[in-house]
Amino acid sequence: MKTRWLALCGLAVLALVFAGCENKEAPTGAAGTAGATNNEAVTVTIGMGENGFLTEEEFDRYITSPVRKKTPWITVQPIIYGEGANLPQLVAAGQTPDMVIHHNIGGMDKYIELGLTYPLTEMIKKHNMNLARFEPEVIAEVKASSRMDELMAIPYTRHFSVLYYNKDIFDKFGVPYPKDGMTWDDAYDLAIKVTRREDNVQYRGLETNVIQRPASQLTLPYVDAQTNKAVINTDQWKKVLEMMVKIHLIPGNEQVIANAKANDLFVKDRTLAMFTTNNILFTAHLDTATNLNWDMASLPTWKEAPGLGFRLDQHMLSITATSKNKDADFLVISTVTSDEVQTDLTRQGRLSILQDPKIKDAFGADLAFLKGKNMKAIFATKPAKAYVPTVYDDFGLLNTAMKDVVAKKKDVNTALREAEDKLNQKIKEQMAAQ
């Protein structure tokens, strides 16, 4: 799928860039807003990164085809960022996409920095979009991530957070399966029981992924948005770091990995008993892991924050300020967030951002590999409220701190103090550069 995106869209991106070199004042769309109101042919370009959003097939299924069916005068053209053709370069070439797909966790920063923000208030009123259909959390998160009072994007899907587990490992060691409603302390106790070395194979009990995720359950910020000072050397951050370190100091469970490497340990190597993360059904290829005997339990929670999962990780559509096709752009958003598309998207294993319980209940209905899985785990926790983000947030510092404590036996207090000092220094340098 990755190669096909490059093959189909790479030439289109290069063509736009070269066109921009010839005429930097060239319009960003094929027609004006009349295309939306008078049914005149119009092309809407949508820019997005190659990885982590939509595959070629998904883009066609959830955007191109539904838009063509509902508004046949609108043609959607994906612009996949690549080497020499990222969003800033397209903007510099005068070929800014009409719309962009991005996510709420740091994904809007470049959009804001480039001056592309376009408030959707008037479009929402003009096209009668009912925001009450959406989960209130996802709408609030748009404002939080943009640090603006008006909506600069409309979400179309979000991740869920669960604990995935390998049933065969639990069966091998005669340990009961994880249950819904566990705390992090419960998960730690269970991890001890399934972290073993047998037949020269090391089985790991639990991988918690990047530290910002369990920290997000407690809405812990990195930087005070009012003072621009780091706030990571705190009792709450210490609590999170100590628990994650404690889990990784279980003998045999010392390896600290995340994301793709953790996916592989769980799905390919099949030596990881439990993995807490977001929706990895397709990124980890659980859909094709036919011989992997896995299931889900609800995400472990903190005792002081029962029922709260990771912060929202949602994918969103924004209109760029330079677009000449804003009405057509918004019709694309309306189509993607329609009940019809959201139901199809949900049945195919992507979580809807709409409140309708009928749509929620349809999650994965068309996917044979999810039959018999504990789907209740997906909805057992609610996303935690997001902290107020800043442009200075640095997710890597505390992951490095955790590795230093686990591998180098550094003291937790020292690791936190050093991480905060480094972040404050980084903030000073960034502010000076600005």
Image (tube, rainbow, N blue to C red):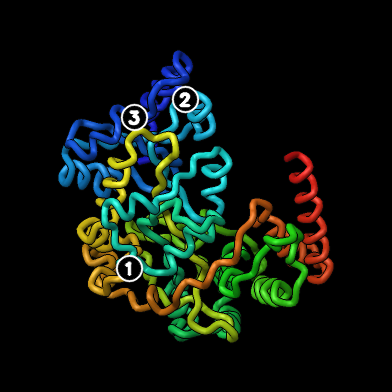
* Percent of width and height locating residue 420: 78, 61
Image height of 248 relative to 350, above or below: below
Circle 1 packing at 10 Å, graded few (<14), some (14-19), many (20+), is: few
On residue 132, the disc is 1
- How packed mark 2 is, by other alpha carbons closer than 10 Å (few <14, some 14-19, many 20 or more), is many
Marks 2, 1: nearer the viewer: 1
Locate residue 215, reporting x and y percent.
Answer: 61, 70
Separation of residues labelled 1 and 3 (CA atoms): 31 Å
Label at residue 94: 2
- Evaluate if marks 3 and 2 touch, with contact meaning CB atoms under 8 Å apart: no
Position in image of residue 345 (x %, y %):
27, 58
Q: Residue at x 56, y 85 (%)?
A: 186
Say left or right for 96 vs 126. Answer: right
The type of residue carrying mark 3 is Gly
User: Disc 2 marks which amino acid?
Assistant: Gly
Q: Secondary structure at mark 3?
A: loop
> At numbered mark 2, what does the secondary structure look like: helix, strand or loop?
loop
Q: Quadrant of the N terminus?
A: top left
Towards the viewer: 263 or 386: 386
Residue at image mark 3: 29
